[in-house]
């Protein structure tokens, strides 16, 4: 695309966005929302209440459900369980906490993943 064509396309987009912005500025519902937000922020400042405080006041369950997962995520992950696989062909035993074990991968390539998962003790 030439620079002139790109310029004209961007100019047309800008004109459309400016028209949309003017329509929003004259929208009564938007004006009411802006007025509400301004009044709410003044009240919050007057009483020294944060947005989190208002949410906790109006909907305590929402506040509890939002904070619970966040605190749990900060904790440590639970330990992985040790899995023990026994190869019935060779009698070899492999203990692993994950699937990234060298011998286990070799078995899965040789015998197939489903068969090796059946060897789980």
Image: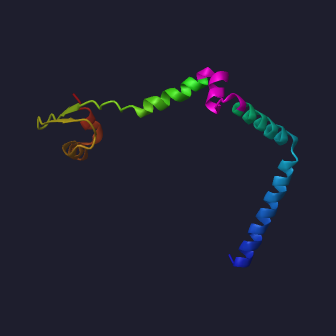
- Residue 8's spot in the image, x, y percent? 77, 72
What percent of the width, then of the height, locates residue 80? 29, 32
Q: Quadrant of the C terminus?
A: top left
Classify 107 as above or below 17.
above
Q: Quadrant of the N terminus?
A: bottom right
Judged by its main secondary structure, the magenta piece is: helix
Tell me the residue at 77%/63% (across/down): 13
Residue 112 x/y as whole percent: 27, 42
The colour scheme used here is rainbow
Q: Which of 12 and 44 is in front in this view?
A: 44
Please tell me whether residue 72 belongs to the stretch shown in magenta.
Answer: no
Residue at image position (74%, 73%) is 7
> Residue shown at 52%/28% (left/top)?
67
The x and y percentages for residue 37 are 76, 37
Q: Give the range drawn in magenta.
A: 46-61
In this view of the protein, which residue sits in the foreground, 61 or 81? 61
Q: Quadrant of residue 87?
A: top left
Left or right side of 59 for 24:
right
Is 114 on the left or on the right of 54, as rendered?
left
In this rendering, the count of numbered labels is 0
- Does 100 sit above or below residue 77? below
Q: Residue at x 21, y 43 (%)?
A: 107
Q: Is residue 65 left or right of residue 85?
A: right
> Which quarter of the picture shows residue 31?
top right
């Amino acid at each position: 695309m030439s620079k002139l064509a790109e310029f004209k396309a961007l100019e047309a987009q800008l004109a459309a966005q400016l028209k949309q912005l003017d329509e929003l500025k004259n929208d009564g519902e938007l004006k009411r929302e802006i007025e509400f937000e301004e009044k709410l922020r003044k009240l919050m400042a007057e009483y020294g209440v944060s947005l989190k405080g208002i949410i906790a006041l109006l909907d305590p369950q929402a506040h509890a459900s939002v904070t619970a997962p966040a605190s749990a995520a900060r904790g440590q992950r639970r330990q992985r369980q040790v899995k023990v696989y026994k190869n019935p062909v060779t009698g070899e035993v492999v203990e692993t906490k994950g699937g990234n074990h060298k011998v286990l991968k070799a078995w899965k390539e040789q015998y197939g993943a489903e068969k090796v998962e059946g060897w789980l003790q």
